[in-house]
Amino acid sequence: MTFFRIQAATRNADNLLDPGHQFSRPWNGDTARTRVGVSVCDSIDDLALYLASHLGNGIPVRDGNWVIVELEADLIPGARPLDPEFETLVRPTRIVAVSPVGTDFIAKIEEAERMLASFDEAPLFDEED
């Protein structure tokens, strides 16, 4: 299966293939919440949605120092991701591609931000209720 993740351009993507590097932590670096497996999204659109959400919007992907890693991986049976809405935990088996975050991907994030913002603008109840 193919998955997508975002990571700092300074990180060597090949390290994801080393079992000694196949751990995930929350973005805030909380080591008490370390999990076995590499955190990924199921699609490039899901990755953009994650980065637009309250969970991933603190990652400064627009600063030019980030890459998208496409990888093949095996699912980890029974894995319990911190953000199951977006995250899947896997054991990478092959790096397919490493690409800098470009304008097309930033446009996907912005589209997801607009979509998520539209929920904030919608009234929760009918005005007459």
Image (cartoon, rainbow, N blue to C red):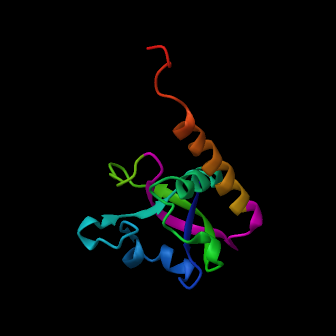
Give the residues drawn in magenta, as a range. Answer: 85-104
Asked whether residue 92 is drawn in magenta, I would say yes
Side (left or right) of 21 relative to 52? left
Give the residue furthest to the bottom.
10
Q: Quadrant of residue 14?
A: bottom right
Nearest to the observer: residue 51 or residue 97? 51
Q: Quadrant of residue 32?
A: bottom left
Q: Position of residue 17 (x, y in %)?
A: 50, 74
Give the residue furthest to the front.
128
Give the residue furthest to the left.
32
Label tally: 0
Image quarter where the C terminus lies is: top left
Q: Is residue 1 in sight in this rendering? A: no
Q: Position of residue 86 (x, y in %)?
A: 48, 50
- Residue at the (40%, 71%) spot, across then down: 22
Above or below, comparing residue 34 to residue 112 in the picture = below
Q: Position of residue 89 (x, y in %)?
A: 42, 57
Asked whether residue 87 is drawn in magenta, I would say yes
Q: Quadrant of residue 8?
A: bottom right
- Residue at the (55%, 83%) spot, across then down: 12
Nearest to the observer: residue 99 or residue 72? 99
